[in-house]
């Protein structure tokens, strides 16, 4: 109920304006967002690298309405790859296709994505296409597959809460596509996604095992200690080397667990979001955990 309300509010323009123009809430967004500028994100990435963690930088933004906004986002991503290389950071990049113009047209979006992937490849780097709400799943997979046939420096994300995901995993593996597995962060109807957490978790474990045993390098994303333990057990049982996959976790979440994974010799990538358009991302983080919401309310009234 609380999760549903917060996810609904994440689409409300009036509430977005109120939250993003309020000094207190802006300050509180720093719990999950590195800052509003690329320089702040690069500084956070440097700290993560110094602590032995890899990074994925995400310039926040989604559902842009004009080609000009989509092109601005593309240019920002080209600049991120230039900066990562210039500053010798151990970081790749994550982006959303609705930020690159998917709502305008899939062909336009594909051209934009290809130009960013080519820049990534020129530096020997990699671009991850985030997965958004289920209205975009099929289109995202199609665009990624088409771009991947031209340049393999791109991968995408699969959400274990969707009924369709096992089929998508098998489809993408046939293309040799690198996948990030996550549970999924959007509000979905029961025809599309498992409504019960135990089904989402069971599907997560099933897909995680397929991915780790596939022979390709994938990202296993979770902040959930039970899922982390399941992946570690599977890798040990199947003798999968710690270098053949990576864990991925959110900036600002369970930093104790993050440090432990690094101490145990696992590859860990931290997802670092930044930019002015942080409201929907911030709301999804509040929605996924009551403790995050309690933190927000407590600090707001303090
Ligand atoms: C690198 C990265 C990339 C992502 N990319 C996408 C994407 O492309 N598309 C998408 O839909 N979603 C994406 N997500 C979000 C993801 O789908 C989940 O919503 C989110 O990670 C919560 O799921 P969970 O596995 O942590 O477990 P949950 O089922 O949410 O939580 C299980 C347990 O994990 C622990 N936990 C979870 N969250 C927290 C927290 N914030 N603080 C402390 N403990 C916590 C708690 O013990 C909790 O009981 C991404 C997340 C990360 C880290």
Image: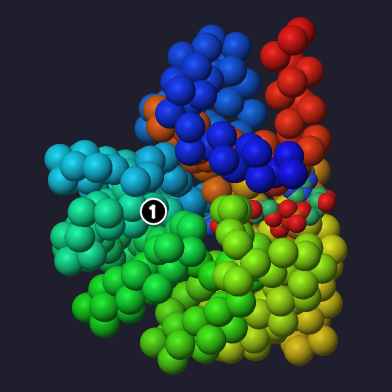
Q: How many marks?
A: 1
Q: Is residue 261 above or below residue 288?
A: below
Image quadrant occupied by the N terminus: top right
Q: Residue at x 65, y 67 (%)?
A: 190
Q: Residue at x 45, y 83 (%)?
A: 172
Image quadrant occupied by the C terminus: top right
Residue 207 pos. (x, y %): 66, 80
Front residue of 176/145: it is 145
Establish whether ligand 1 lies closer than 8 Å to the Cβ of label 1. yes
- Neighbour tally class for label 1: few under 14, some 14-19, many 20 plus, Cα within 10 Å: many
What residue would you read off at disc 1? 96
Q: Is residue 240 above or below residue 124?
A: below
Q: Does any portion of residue 103 appear in the rendered image?
A: yes
Q: Residue at x 57, y 78 (%)?
A: 165
Q: Residue at x 59, y 18 (%)?
A: 25
Front residue of 289/112: it is 289
């Amino acid at each position: 109920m609380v999760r549903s309300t917060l996810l609904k509010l994440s689409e409300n323009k009036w509430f977005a304006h109120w939250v993003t123009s309020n000094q207190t809430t802006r300050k509180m967004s720093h719990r999950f967002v590195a800052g509003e500028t690329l320089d702040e994100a690069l500084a956070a990435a440097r700290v993560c690298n110094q602590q032995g963690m890899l990074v994925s930088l995400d310039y926040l933004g989604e559902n842009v309405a004009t080609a000009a906004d989509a092109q601005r986002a593309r240019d920002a991503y080209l600049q991120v790859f230039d900066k990562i290389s210039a500053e010798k950071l151990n970081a790749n990049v994550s982006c959303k296709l609705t930020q690159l113009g998917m709502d305008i047209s899939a062909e336009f979006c594909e051209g934009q994505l290809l130009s960013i992937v080519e820049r990534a490849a020129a530096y020997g780097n990699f671009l991850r296409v985030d997965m958004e709400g289920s209205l975009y799943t099929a289109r995202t997979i199609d665009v990624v597959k088409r771009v991947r046939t031209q340049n393999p420096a791109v991968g995408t994300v699969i959400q274990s809460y969707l009924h369709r995901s096992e089929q998508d995993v098998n489809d993408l593996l046939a293309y040799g596509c690198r996948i990030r597995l996550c549970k999924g962060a959007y509000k979905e109807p029961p025809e599309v996604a498992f409504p019960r957490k135990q089904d989402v978790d069971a599907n997560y474990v099933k897909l995680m095992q397929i991915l780790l045993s596939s022979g390709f390098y994938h990202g296993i994303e979770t902040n959930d200690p039970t899922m982390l333990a399941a992946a570690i057990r599977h890798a040990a049982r199947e003798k999968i080397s710690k270098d053949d996959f990576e864990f991925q976790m959110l900036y600002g979440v369970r930093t104790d667990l993050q440090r432990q994974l690094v101490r145990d010799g696992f590859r860990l990538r931290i997802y670092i979001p930044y930019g002015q358009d942080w409201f929907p991302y911030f709301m999804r983080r509040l929605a996924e955990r009551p403790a995050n919401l309690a933190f927000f309310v407590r600090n707001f009234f303090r």
